[in-house]
Image (cartoon, rainbow, N blue to C red):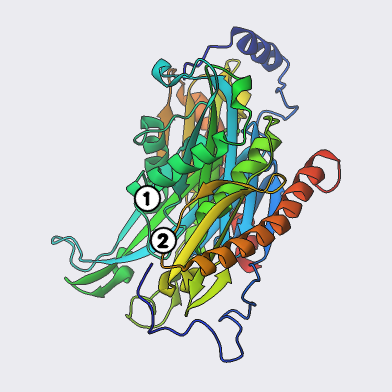
Amino acid sequence: MGGYGDVQLLRDDGLRLDGRKLDEMRPVSIEAGILPAADGSAMVTHGLNVAVAAVYGPMEAHPRKIQRQDRAVIDVRYNMAPFSTGDRIRPGYNRRSREISKVTAEALESVVLVERYPRSKIRVEIEILAAEAGTRCAGITAAAVALADAGIPMRDLIVGVASGKVEDTVVLDLDKAEDNYGQADLPVGILPNTGEIAFLQMDGDLSPDEYNLAMEYNFKAAAEIHEIMVDALKRRYEGGEN
Amino acid sequence: MVELVPTLLRQELARLAEDDQRLDGRSQWEGREVSLEVDCLYNAEGSAKVVMGKTIVYAGVKFELRTPWPDRPTQGSLMCGAELRPVAHRKYEPGPPSPQSIELGRVVDRGIRESGCIDMESLCIVPGEKVWGVMIDIHVLSDGGNIFDACGLAAIAALRTAIVPAERFDVGEDYKLKVNGTPIMSSFTRVGGRYIYDPSEEEELGGDERIHITLGDEGHLHSLQKGLRGVFTPAEFAEIFDVAHQRCADLRTLVANQEGN
């Protein structure tokens, strides 16, 4: 986490700088099936974050050494567009995007029924078009909707959410200022129906009680986002809007 | 990924060409409907989204402060790059920039640069010390054919709506980037033996060489590119050049209308 103590992140009335309550998430909207070239796709707008996910496959896994005899591998690329942040990002992979891609792939392999597709590969491309804290979570949510849109069987959806700590107070869904100057960040990927956790990272400083509260907030937010995900998929396939 | 040459598709395209028809019912010089949205990306200083059929492209403009090149102490710089990431189509693979994406970025770059629509001197803040570097990044999200025209359109629309973030860099107040002109690209592919405007994905797959023409406001040529295997005659070029004039004028009007909104 960045430095803290010198920036006020909670207002005198107890609300956050953008007027949210402690356990209130930023607005989320989701659209499924937005990319015609992909087998499945989704766009997630989470606050000011915009994440797009495309799914290709299942397809033949190559090079052959990545093949698994008993299951499919999920090949995830998380990438931030050069214009997605305040200062331009040089195109290409960096250590941060490689790590996020790796743990996201492992989280998705935990929910997709990969054993149905031995020796194959499912490509998941996550592109961040606008970033304002919480892009990995928006990316996970987008990937889950895109996988469902591609008709790939899954045990459950997976929802990316984060809570954290600012000014010694646990808050749900950090925005940019809270992420930069806060004290902790706890992004997770939650399976909304089973209540399991497939993605977990954390940095900063949390007491056990603070961790429990942050996780409680995360589960509450996951249930809300889950409804929006299901709604997006229904709109795509029940001939509603779209 | 190995692309198979679809013999049946080529035969079908040749058969349609004989009757002056196209796979999706368009006439020879008819483009797909183009949707253009500007100012659509939160962190970019200028942005645009272009949708043409199954093709979706975003462009974003970013600025940076840099020291000028020693031989051009009063000039800023402009750079335009395109990324053909694997998100855009199953045929694109991860890795360093491919020759296709480099060609794409450079052809778009030349059209904008050579049109002179950006006065490099106007990007100077302190001669010899501090100038603006303008960077246009093009991101192809879905390749449904003719990404060249989509990228060219997104790039110039993003540039024309860009705000120079002077306050953030502590060098004065934000102001609108001055752009003198709207260079527009038109692309043609040989399909079934004759040229067509605005190829679809199938027409690119079953077609031959392509020609890209970028025209400025006065109808002058600013960039030309012939890509892929094949040859053409001067008479063929004269014909598509006439079409390019009209198509470029139509798209220039579209950009102007979007800016007005």
Front of the two marks 2 and 1:
2
The amino acid pointed to by label 1 is: Arg
Quadrant containing the N terminus of chain A in the rendered view = bottom left
Residue A60 in picture, x, y percent from top left: 53, 17
Residue B1 in picture, x, y percent from top left: 46, 20
User: Residue A203 got which mark?
Assistant: 2
Question: Spatial distance from mark 2 to mark 1, Cα to Cα?
Answer: 14 Å
Q: Residues within 10 Å of mark 2 (few under 14, many from 20)?
A: few
The amino acid pointed to by label 2 is: Asp
Number of marks: 2
Residue at the image point whose x is 56% and y is 92% from the top: A12
Look at the numbered disc 1 and give the secondary structure of its residue: helix
Q: Residue furthest front?
A: A208
Q: Label 1 belongs to which residue?
A: A96
Look at the numbered disc 2 and give the secondary structure of its residue: strand
Against B244, is B131 above or below? below
Residue B220 seen in this snapshot: no
Which numbered disc, 2 or 1, marks the residue that appears first in the sequence?
A: 1
Residue at the image point whose x is 64% and y is 8% from the top: B8
Chain letter belonging to callout 1? A
Depth check: A235 or B113 in front?
A235
Residue at the image point whose x is 52% and y is 69% from the top: A210
Residue A169 seen in this snapshot: yes
Against A212, is B151 above or below? above
A31 to the left or right of B234:
right
